[in-house]
Amino acid sequence: MGRDVPGNDESAGKRRSGKTRKGSKWLSQTLVECSKAANRSKDTYLAAQYARLRARRGANKATIAVCHSILTAAWHMLQTGQTYTDRGGDFFARRDPERARKRLVGQPERVAYTITPQKGAVPA
């Protein structure tokens, strides 16, 4: 992986730290507060990103990842003068619909139900 991927920084076989660097306390506290508010919002990209990462990495790392996304978006808005356009809560499902379908079919099977998808079936 590349050097710019947090937590995966490696060079010559040596793994370097993936910890966040020291910075402004008020900024990091504000970003965490904004991130937690975004996590609770409905049908937004940041809430979907948090839910997706929380399942794999845990709540704290997901919160910091959303902080990073907010900070990156703010920087781009200040640089370009454009407004923020949310990608939507269904962004990841739209990006890879087959993966979303497999996940939704697998959910009932994990609690002992069997689902057989039918092509062109209309829900009642």
Image: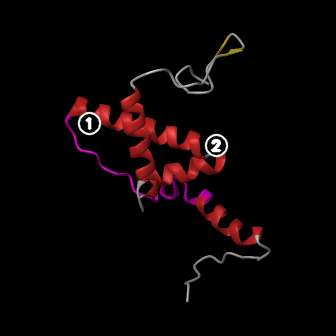
79, above or below 69, in the image: above
Point out which mark residue 77 bears: 1
Judge from the rendering whether residue 75 lies leftward or rightward of residue 6; answer left or right.
left
Residue that extends furthest to the bottom in the rendered view of this protein: 124
Judge from the rendering whether residue 100 lies leftward or rightward of residue 76; answer left or right.
right
Closer to us: 11 or 54:
54
Closer to us: 113 or 47:
47
Confirm whether the magenta stretch covers residue 96: yes
Q: Secondary structure at mark 2?
A: helix
Q: Secondary structure at mark 1?
A: helix
Name the residue at 34% across, 51% down.
Answer: 86
Closer to us: 31 or 13:
31
Q: Position of residue 96 (x, y in %)?
A: 55, 54
Name the residue at 39% across, 24% down.
Answer: 24
Point out which mark residue 51 bears: none
Name the residue at 37% across, 38% down.
Answer: 30
The region drawn magenta spans 81-99
Judge from the rendering whether residue 10 lies leftward or rightward of residue 21; answer left or right.
right
Query: From the image, which quarter does the N terminus lie in?
Result: top right
Q: Position of residue 82 (x, y in %)?
A: 22, 40
